[in-house]
Amino acid sequence: MSRTPAPRTQVIPARPTPSPPLKIGVIVGSVREGRFADTVARWFVAEMGRRDDMETHVIDLSEPALVDELKLTFERSAAPGDAPTLAERVGGLDGFVVVTPEYNHGYPAALKLAIDYVYQEWRAKPVGFVSYGGMAGGQRAVEQLRQVFAELHAVTLRDTVSFHMAWEQFDDEGRPHDTDGTAKAAAVLLDQLAWWGLTLREGRAVRPYDG
């Protein structure tokens, strides 16, 4: 006597819940008058704007509120008025991209001050770099910054975007002459930032980092 096999129940996999966009801080590390950082930062922020998995939050160290808060001293002070402190701004973000020049084979003093002014808020978060300068393209500044962020338990990304002889790489409208090459370099950096940003955000939610 044969039996009709019971019909198989089709299991439909659950659709993954979309993750909210990563909150990424773009830190403009130069405060010099007439700085080239504005050109580089504007271009990179525009590249980030092409993505829907990230929110851009610019932290410009030349902002009057930040200049007043930092006061070029290591002593902590309250942010002026109702402005959030630098630590509060960093703490609310999922990752960072530092836009930095190279000054005398190093990175700007104002950037070091801002990094040191914050501590725990950097931990277990990814940091990418967009650098510019002369022949070295700011890479010596980036290598020094990697050591600093390692001490703060941040994760620095392998690939960077760098502009060698930067003032020759952009037209009068602030657009790179090599639009395709720079866009691809930015995409590689942002893809890595998205992976690390999401992975570390989920990890901190499950198990707070106490390293």
Image: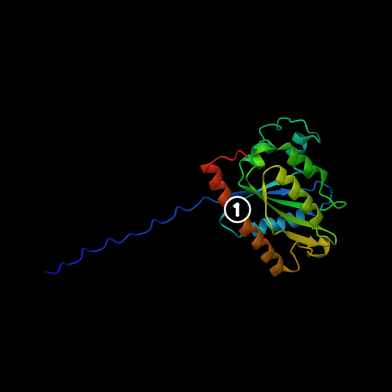
Give the side of residue 94 with respect to residue 20, left or right.
Answer: right
Q: How is the image coloured?
A: rainbow
Tell me which corner region of the image, top left, top right, bottom left or bottom right, holds residue 50.
bottom right
Q: Quadrant of the C terminus?
A: top right
Nearest to the observer: residue 122 or residue 89: 122
Outermost residue toward the left in this view: 1
Nearest to the observer: residue 148 or residue 165: 148
User: Could you tell me residue 114's position as x and y percent?
Assistant: 75, 40
User: Could you tell me residue 79's position as x and y percent?
Assistant: 70, 33
Residue at (71%, 68%) from the top-left corner?
Answer: 181
Query: Which residue position holds label 1?
Result: 196
Task: Report the number of numbered marks.
Answer: 1
Give the side of residue 124 with respect to residue 16, left or right.
Answer: right
Nearest to the observer: residue 32 or residue 11: 11
Outermost residue toward the right in this view: 104
Residue at (76%, 62%) from the top-left corner?
Answer: 173
Question: Relative to residue 139, is residue 30 depicted above or below?
Answer: above
Q: Name the secondary structure under disc 1.
A: helix
Residue at (74%, 69%) from the top-left corner?
Answer: 178
User: Could you tell me residue 123's position as x and y percent?
Assistant: 65, 42
Give the side of residue 30 with respect to residue 82, left or right.
Answer: right
Residue at (69%, 69%) from the top-left corner?
Answer: 180
Q: Is residue 56 visible?
A: yes
Q: Quadrant of the N terminus?
A: bottom left
Question: Relative to residue 69, is residue 34 depicted above or below?
Answer: below
Q: Is residue 49 visible?
A: no
Tell me which corner region of the image, top left, top right, bottom left or bottom right, holds residue 193.
bottom right
Kind of residue sitting beneath label 1? Trp
User: Could you tell me residue 122's position as x and y percent?
Assistant: 66, 42
